[in-house]
Amino acid sequence: MANIPPGHVEIVEGSARMIYDEKEAVFYNKVQVLNRDLSIQTIKLFSEVITSERLTKYQAKLEKYKKNPSNFERAPFQPADGISVLDALAATGLRSVRYMKEIPKLQHITINDLLSEATEVAMTNIKTNGIDPTKVTVNNGDACMLMYQHREPTQNYDVIDLDPYGSAAPFLDSAVQAVSGDGGLLCVTCTDSPVLSGNYPEVCYAKYGAMPLKCKYLHEMALRILLNSIETAANKYKRYIVPWLSLSVDFYVRVFVRVYESPAEVKNTCLKRIMTYQSVQCSSFINQTVGLRSMTKKEKMDAAKNSKAKDEATDTSSGPTVASGNYSAGYLEVPPLCEESGARWKIGGPFWGAPIHDQHMVDTILARVDLARVAQSTTSAGATPSAAAIEEEPRHVIQTAERLGGMLTSISEELKDVPFYYSLPDLASTLQCTVPTHLDFKSALINAGYRVSHFHHDPSAFKTDAPNSVVWDIMRSHCKLHPPNSKKLSEAAKRILAKECAVQADFTPAQILLGPKKKVARFPPNPEPNWGPKRRAGRAEKVEKVTATSTAASVDEEGDDEPSSKKPKA
């Protein structure tokens, strides 16, 4: 192992050993270790899945070719046993080095950054870590131009990772073209949380094409805005996305989506977009699908066989039917005013309305992280792991296994088909009453015949398929047991409490909530004080030092992307 040069420091993360100038090392942010750990696990699983899918397709084509070679111009090509990756905004290459050393099926990686000083450091660290230089291409240039140069299917990357300082919006158009169209993986991070969360709606609409809402479900809304933007970019090129995993963690959002090319499937994109109507005086919201599609005759027959439905069961709306198999605009099914508080609606969207996670993939990644977590805790305790655990143990230590396991457990338990969530303290604040316990409130929903779960970013949140009226009926029932101070009630609260309960809440603890639970911290506290984004490299230096220090790109950059006119002046 090479010696550390004077004026430099060594940073070890995972299997990577990085050498940085002392001035650059201050920009290393431990917050992003979880991001990289999760990315490695996800890409590792993807490499296995895509290799298996391509091999299956190749074998099917080969069988057809052997039966009748004259129908083919040439024999089918055998797919490579591995993947190619583009780290488009690599900075000094920490993420790239870890990918290369910890993902077995990674055959080639392209490391790109706009700053020549950053790519020079990346090349040094590649040598330091003993990586085969024939498997690495280091490019110093504009990320968008590089991806536009790889639009041809034969030049597509299997995985593209976008981890910018701020918004990924400028890179999406080129990225959806440069990633493989047979299910390539896009890994996208955005750290402009104030924009995606509704603080700057004009900026969000300009960048992402969606109008955000000031609401309690801001963390999920940010994910659905980003997914909607990626889908919009992909649709222009006859491509569409299938989300694998989407998470809001710390100060950023991170999504993993597969990209497919299919003009027929792109037509269904209007069925996956929603507009959301949010009451301005309470937590009530209504999701409205942008478009709808009627069933074809075959689909009607299949539906009738499967569910014994009648022939008049056509499309998903309750409005007039459209021609069989045709698409049309969705029908407005929102009352003029909020039926609970009598307030007006604010309109947000369009948002991604389909599931934001793939349950099977989440469970698979979680199982691997749990295995690593148990093995690492056993080793740290001084015990000898079992032979099976040793054989199955991951190749490399997952530094954030405890926190990552808790977050993935929370995601695995979420309702996947329910967009957005309520905040229990916010419901109680509207009525000026005590906050019900999660056990009581969730039990009431389950006893009423509805599903309920939490949301992985907010421990006070709950997702449910119950309508607004049922949610407020439970709150009204709670207020009868715990009356609020009538002198402090707002007009909206008085209107809500004045309504009669159509559903009488049953707060008897639901058995499903009392059963044994997995012992893991689903919402762990921040590991350290000041756990958040760091400033961009060189931002706090004097003017004469900016040129020298700003060339040192931060190790996996992160931060916000507020309009300069709205940032506090020095």
Image: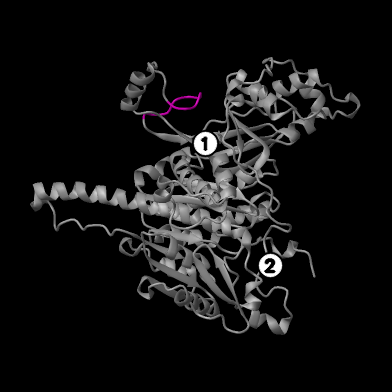
Is 445 or 383 nearer to us in this picture?
Answer: 383
Instruction: Answer yes or no: is residue 89 visible.
Output: no
Dividing the picture into quarters, in which one does residue 294 lie?
A: top left
Mark 1 lies on a secondary structure that is loop
The figure's colour scheme reads: one colour
Magenta stretch in the rendered image: 315-324
Dividing the picture into quarters, in which one does residue 91 lie?
A: bottom right
* 401 horizontally vs 340: left or right: left
Q: CA distance from mark 1 to mark 2?
A: 35 Å
Q: Residue at x 41, y 63 (%)?
A: 85
Other-residue count near label 2 (Cα within 10 Å), few / some / many at <14 / 14–19 / ≥20:
some
> What secondary structure is the magenta-colored segment mainly?
loop
Mark 2 lies on a secondary structure that is loop
In this rendering, the answer to whether 557 lies above or below 477 is below
Q: Residue at x 60, y 78 (%)?
A: 551
Please provide percent x and percent y for residue 522: 62, 41
Instruction: Answer yes or no: is residue 411 visible.
Output: yes
Is 451 or 363 nearer to us in this picture?
Answer: 363
* 179 horizontally vs 563: left or right: left
Please provide percent x and percent y for residue 354: 50, 39
Quadrant placement of the C terminus: bottom right
* Amino acid type for the residue under numbered disc 2: Arg
* Amino acid type for the residue under numbered disc 1: Lys
Please provide percent x and percent y for residue 316: 47, 27
Does residue 259 belong to the magenta stretch?
Answer: no
Q: Which residue is mark 1?
A: 416
Q: Which residue is mark 2?
A: 535
Other-residue count near label 1 (Cα within 10 Å), few / some / many at <14 / 14–19 / ≥20:
some
Q: Residue at x 44, y 51 (%)?
A: 393
Is 481 or 68 nearer to us in this picture?
Answer: 481
